Image (tube, grey):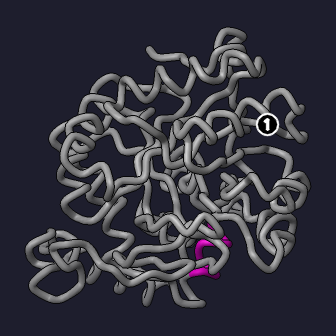
Amino acid sequence: MLRVCALRAACCEFACASGGAAHQTELGLVPSSHSSTLSRMGCNWNRVVLGRSAVPSSALGIGSSFGIQSPDLEYAFERGINYFYWGSVRRPGFGRAVRGLARHHRDRMVIVVQSYTRVGSLMRCSLLSGLRKLGADYADFLLLGWWNELPPDRILDAARALQEQGLARHLMISCHHRPSFQVYAELPDIDAVMVRYNAAHPGAEEEVFPHLGEDPPGVVAYTATRWSDLVNPSLTPEGLATPRASDCYRFVLSNSSVNCCITGPKNRAELDEAMCALDRGPMDPDELSWMRLVGAGVKKHARPHSGSMSLVDRLTGIHSP
């Protein structure tokens, strides 16, 4: 099995290296206008529907926290990526690149602005700050960040008011307490959820995905590489091949419950490797089994990770470095 996986990876690496937007268009994989094919999930270049929001998105989204900027974001957009996440760390270069794209292509973009604020009266300020830096009049999604329990009425009311004002079209919520997602899925206001899911932390398969209902919210996954641990050879169990980053994204996007997966590239090389996941397509059963073995080993031996946010960001949600 490992030899087969390694051979496939080598062949796909060649295909990714010789690819690019023009080559894919020539092969009919990515029409120059971006594919109009819509589905609930997919590890390919077709547009996916973010759950009941009906927002068409690329299967990969790019986060603002790790350093990617112009001209690489423009390049990603030309390849077919249209989901841009203004998240926990907001790099100025990312904001400038999104602003440039929004000037001409806003109607083809999915812009997500996160707010950690715990003060309802400050949520508008948090959202407007993000929109100004992105050159956008509205967010496709306002992401209510890190709510392990149901947000109080003051938060939900403030978010609904921003929707009524046309500043946010849909609401999304993120959480580290998996059982809470069932509650969020039952809220008609919540059109998408953001879930930690990767080969080392597959618990959402049992604790989240089966409990989202018949008309589920959009599901956006993050930490696909487990903060790079899954691609670290020193953490790979003996006798197993070390995954590439694109393998990690393919694992996530091979799950039919996931609509979109966030990537956080620092540069063009990391961006190309992430997008290669969409070139290579979903994993077969042997590859999925291999990733689960690697993930179990990584989880056993890697150091734990925990997020943090400052008091200022909890209050305002407008942190920028």
**Left or right of residue 120: residue 257:** left
Seen from this angle, which residue lies furthest front? 164
Dominant secondary structure of the residues highlighted in magenta in the image = helix
Q: Is residue 265 above or below residue 321?
A: below
Residue 297 in percent (x, y) is at 69, 60
Which sits in the foreground, 242 or 12?
12
Please tell me whether mark 1 sits on a helix, a strand or a loop: helix
Magenta range: 288-294
Classify the position of the C terminus by image quarter.
top left
**Left or right of residue 2: residue 312:** right
Q: Is residue 216 above or below residue 31?
A: above
Q: Which three-letter amino acid code belongs to the residue tagged 1?
A: Leu
Q: Is residue 167 above or below residue 122?
A: below
* Mark 1 nearby-residue class (10 Å; few <14, some 14–19, many ≥20): some
Name the residue beneath numbered marker 1.
156
Residue 122: quarter of image: top right
Residue 319 in percent (x, y) is at 53, 16
**Left or right of residue 36: residue 25:** left
Q: Residue at x 27, y 34 (%)?
A: 99
Residue 197: quarter of image: bottom right
Q: Residue at x 67, y 75 (%)?
A: 257
Residue 273: quarter of image: bottom left
Q: Is residue 313 above or below residue 138?
A: above
